[in-house]
């Protein structure tokens, strides 16, 4: 059951989506750092906006970063399980 | 123009908080434009790819296509970040000494397209080697990459000094003042012109380009970066910057790869 589930998950597509999100969030995050580091004057609305986007970007970076590693590990397990299953089936034949 | 006059302070929440002076023409500048044009570059690159790709671009099934794409994406992601960090090795060294290395994940350094290209190419090549699929896969990617990077460079220019991709000072009529009162080589514009010309060349129906468009793009762009990065202020190691060394290694790898693939096809033809 779990093996079938692992085989049905589109690991490659999930990794591509996560990699794109990670790259975009990383770029945006750097801008926030620059805005604050280079002494950009920040008004109340801008401050709130930067804080909100920074939180979102950090959240996206953390989630996608961990997500990529977890997906890669699961993909590897699924691939190994498939190969192991094939080996067992060949031996039984 | 002095520094104070160069920086045009308006409302802080406007996207035109600084002015870039391109010759006599003032252009609104803000680091946030980088993100806008980066997103536009992804969208435009994909749209161009959809428009130009043949009905069946890859001689492989859906799973293999996505596996290759995943490997390329991961390679590009790692490459763009690691090379950007390598470029700022002094900052990395400082962070390491202070025990703040994990903070560099989101701190200065950003991303570099040269690293993304090299990493993506390496990831794709690795996936092709593991899956055993040697079919040509990047033919339809070369032109979208050219236009995508060109659009991204508009963002680099409009981001001003904050982007770290500006040129060295120059006394030229077309020098660009990024807000510090110093005229600089508009290296981003040079690159846009180069990429549009390269896209035009790659779009031609020359027979010598058949099946080699991605490699021609890679070699041309890496050689271009070796040349244009001489016009960017950066720490040098033996007369070249870190990105230039990696680009040089990439060009050499491409040549070796080309020589080996040429020998393989010759052996197949004679067998």
Image: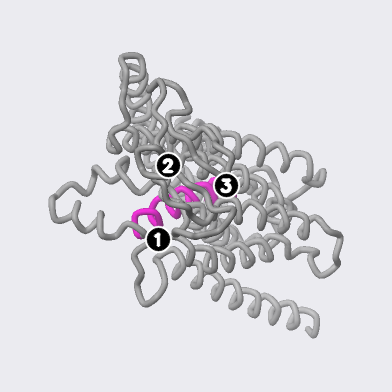
User: Residue B9 vs residue B265: left or right?
Assistant: left
Secondary structure type for disc 3: loop
Labels 1 and 3 in the same subunit: yes
Q: Quadrant of the C terminus of chain B?
A: bottom right
Q: Which residue is painted at 36% across and 69% down in the image?
A: B236
Q: CA distance from mark 2 to mark 3?
A: 13 Å
Residue A60, horizontal then vertical, whole percent:
39, 29
For the N terminus of chain B, which image quadrant?
Answer: top left
Query: Which region shows up in magenta?
Result: B67-86
- Chain of the residue displaying label 1: B
The verdict on residue B75 being magenta is yes
Q: Quadrant of residue B83?
A: bottom left
Of all residues, the one furthest to the top in this rendering is A45
| Residue receiving disc 1 | B233
Which callout, 2 or 3, points at the residue further toward the start of the chain?
Answer: 3
- The chain letter for the residue carrying disc 2 is B
Q: Is residue B56 above or below residue B131?
A: above
Within 10 Å of the Cα at label 3, are there few (<14), some (14-19), or many (20+) other Cα atoms?
A: few
Tell me the mark number nearer the camera, choosing from 1 and 2. Answer: 2
Whether the residues at callouts 1 and 3 have beta carbons within 8 Å, the answer is: no
Helix or strand or loop: what does disc 1 sit on?
Answer: loop
Percent of width and height locating residue A3: 47, 36
Q: Residue at x 83, y 58 (%)?
A: B204
Q: Residues within 10 Å of mark 1 (few under 14, many from 20)?
A: some
Q: State whether the magenta stretch is mostly helix, strand or loop.
A: helix
Are both tags, 2 and 3, on one chain? yes
């Amino acid at each position: 059951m779990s093996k079938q589930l692992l085989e049905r998950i589109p690991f490659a597509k999930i990794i591509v989506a996560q990699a794109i999100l990670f790259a975009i969030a990383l770029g945006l995050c750097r801008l926030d750092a620059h805005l604050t580091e280079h002494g950009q004057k920040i008004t109340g609305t801008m401050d709130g906006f930067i804080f909100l986007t920074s939180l979102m970007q950090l959240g996206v970076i953390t989630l996608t970063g961990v997500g990529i590693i977890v997906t890669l590990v699961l993909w590897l397990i699924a691939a190994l399980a498939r190969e192991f299953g094939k080996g067992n089936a060949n031996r039984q034949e | 123009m002095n520094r104070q006059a160069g920086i045009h302070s308006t409302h802080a929440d406007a996207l035109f908080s600084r002015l870039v002076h391109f010759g006599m023409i003032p252009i609104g500048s803000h680091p946030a434009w980088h993100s806008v044009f980066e997103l536009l570059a992804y969208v435009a690159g994909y749209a161009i790819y959809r428009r130009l790709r043949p009905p069946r671009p890859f001689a492989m099934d859906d799973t293999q296509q996505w596996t290759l794409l995943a490997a390329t994406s991961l390679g590009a992601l790692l490459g763009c970040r690691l090379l950007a960090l390598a470029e700022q090795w002094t900052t990395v060294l400082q962070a390491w000494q202070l025990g703040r290395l994990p903070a560099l994940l989101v701190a200065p350094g950003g991303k570099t397209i040269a690293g993304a290209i090299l990493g993506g190419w390496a990831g794709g090549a690795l996936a092709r080697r593991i899956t055993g699929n040697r079919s040509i896969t990047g033919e339809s990617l070369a032109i979208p990459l050219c236009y995508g990077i060109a659009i991204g460079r508009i963002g680099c220019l409009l981001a001003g000094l904050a982007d770290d991709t500006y040129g060295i000072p120059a006394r030229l009529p077309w020098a660009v003042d990024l807000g510090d009162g110093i005229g600089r080589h508009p290296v981003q514009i040079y690159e846009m012109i180069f990429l549009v010309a390269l896209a035009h060349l790659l779009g031609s129906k020359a027979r010598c380009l058949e099946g080699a468009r991605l490699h021609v793009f890679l070699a041309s762009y890496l050689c271009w970066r070796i040349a244009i990065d001489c016009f960017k202020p950066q720490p040098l190691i033996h007369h070249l910057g870190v990105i230039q060394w990696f680009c040089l290694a990439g060009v050499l790898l491409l040549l070796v790869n080309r020589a080996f693939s040429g020998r393989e096809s010759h052996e197949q033809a004679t067998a």
